[in-house]
Amino acid sequence: MMLAEVAATSSALAATSSRIKKRRLLADLLRRTEPEEVPVVARYLAGELRQRRTGLGWRSLNGMPSPAAEPSLGVLDVDAAFERMAALAGPGSAAARIALAAELFAAATAEEQALLRGLVAGELRQGALDSLLLDAVAEAAGVPAEAVRRAAMLAGGTEPVAEAALAADDPEAALAALGAFGLTVGRPVRPMLAGSAPDVAAAVEGFGGRGVIVDAKLDGIRIQVHRAGDLVRVYTRSLDDITERVPEIVAVVQRMRVEDAVLDGEAIALDEAGRPRPFQETAARSATSDAEVASAVTLTPFFFDVLHVDGRDLLDLPLMERLAVLDEIAPGNVVERVSTADAGVAQDAFARWVAAGQEGVIVKDAAAGYEAGRRGSAWVKVKPRHALDLVVLAVERGSGRRSGLLSNIHLGARDPEGGFVMLGKTFKGMTDEMLAWQTRRFSELAVEDDGWTVRLRPEQVVEIAFDGLQRSSRYPGGLALRFARVLRYRDDKTAAEADTIDAVRALASTRTETDGPDDTVA
C-alpha cells in the first residue's frame, strides 16, 4: 500500500466529525491493506509510529526538504526508514538521523509530509481512536465488534488482532482467528479501568441497590503479575515489563501456593507505620533497579483481582467468585475491601481509608466479569477531592526565581473524537524537584518553541486538583478550572487514559460558576 492512501484517509478522517463516517473510512482502507502491511497501517491510523522513540524532534523537522510532486512511498518502506532512525545511537547518530529523515521527507508529497509530521510529533488530529479502529476492523472483516474488542483486550494490542482478522478469507474464518486469542500466562492483557463518580453515595446508588464491593484505592502504581511455575513477570498498566526492577514483588508471588496465576493489583511504598509514602517515591522506585534506591524504598504488592489460576481462566466469573479464589492464594497481600449495598457503610470505609493516606475507593459490581481494557460502569472510582487526570499540552518558561525552568503548564482534557481540549494553566503545587524534572521531561517532548511557550507532544499525564469549574469564553471547551494545582505526574498512565472533556462537562453540570477573574493560572 502507498503511504498516499493512508495520508488521504487521514485527511478525510480529520475533515469529518461523524463517527460512522470515520469508521467507514477506516474500514475501506483496511480492506485494501495487504496482511503484512496491516500492523503498520493500523498504527498509523491510530496516530502513532510503531517505533516508540525515533530521536526526532520538532527542530529536526523544521528544515525538511520541499515536498515531492508525485507519491512514491510504500508504508513498509516508511516503517523501515523510521526503524533505521530509531536504531541509531552514539556519536554522529543525530546527524545521520536527520539525513535519513530528510531523505524520507524529500520523497513525500505535501499531504504525506503532513501525515509524517503528525506521526512524529504525536499530534495527528484525525479522531481515529483505538476503539474506533477496532470497530473498523470488525466492519472490514465482517464480524461482531465485540469479538474484535475481546481479542484485542486479551492480545494486549490492536495490531495482531487486526492482522489476524483481516487475513482471514471470510467472516467465519475471521471469527475463528479472533477466538484463538485467549488469556496466555506471560502475555499481559489490557487492564480493566474504572469510571468516576462525584461521591460515594452516587457511586453506590448507580448500581441500583445491588451488592457492591468497595475497594480501597491505593496511592500506588497499577501492576499485573503473571506467574508460570517459578517464572514471574511484572507489568505496568501500560503493559511495560518492569520485572527486573521489582524483585521484592517477584518474591511475594513466588511464595504463593499456585503453579500459574495472573493477578491484578497495586504496588506501593509504605513507611514504618504502614502508611503510604509519597507517590513520587513509589513511582521512582518502580522506574529503576538501582541498588541504592531499592535498599531505601521497598514496594509491597496488594492484589484486588485474579484472572487465571492453575489452568483456569476466571475472567468471566462474577467478581465475588474471583475474590474468593484471590483470598485463598494471596493472604496478606489483598487490597482491603468491604461488601455492602449500603452507601453509609461504603462512606465509612471511604473516610477510614482516606484518613489512612489512600486515594479513595473503587466501587465494583459484585456480579460483573473482568472486562479487560475497558472503562465501563462495572467499576467506579471516587476520590476525596475534585481531581482530574489531564494532559500537558504546552509549558511556559519561568521568570524570576524560576528563570531557566519550564514552569506554567497548559492543561487539556481528552476529546473522545480526537485531540485535547484546553482547560487552563497552573504552576501551583510544584516543588523544586518537580520543576527540575518537568524541565527535563518537557524539553524531550517539545515540538515548537516561540521563545516563551513551548508546545509539547501530548503524552505526559498530570493529576490536577481544583476547587471547581467556571464557564469561560477563553477556552474552546467553554470551561476553565478554578485554582488548579498539581498533585503529581502520572507516568503510569498514557494520554489515552486521561479524563475526557465529557467527564469534565458532566462534573460541571452539577455546579458551574460564571466567568470571573482568571483563576486558572496560579
Image: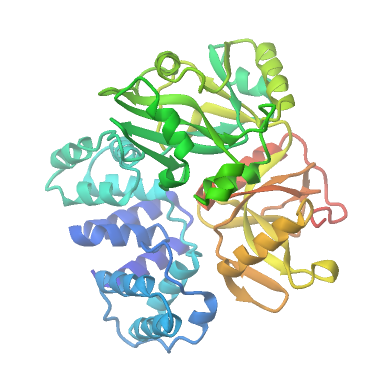
Is residue 239 in view?
A: no
Horizontal and vertical percent position of residue 107: 33, 84
Above or below for 486 versus 311: below
- Looking at the image, the residue that sits furthest to the left is 169
Q: How many marks?
A: 0
Above or below for 31 versus 339: below
Left or right of 21, for residue 345: right
Horizontal and vertical percent position of residue 340: 58, 10
Name which residue lies at 40% across and 27% down: 370
Horizontal and vertical percent position of residue 515: 83, 51
Q: Quadrant of residue 8?
A: bottom left
Above or below for 331 versus 103: above
Is residue 19 in view?
A: yes
Name which residue lies at 64% across and 10% down: 342
Q: How is the image coloured?
A: rainbow
Q: Quadrant of residue 391?
A: bottom right
Quadrant (top left/top right/bottom left/bottom right) for the C terminus: bottom right
In front: 129, or 56? Answer: 56
In front: 271, or 182? Answer: 271
Left or right of 479, for residue 313: left
Name which residue lies at 51% across and 23% down: 333
Quadrant (top left/top right/bottom left/bottom right) for the N terminus: bottom left
Horizontal and vertical percent position of residue 410: 69, 60
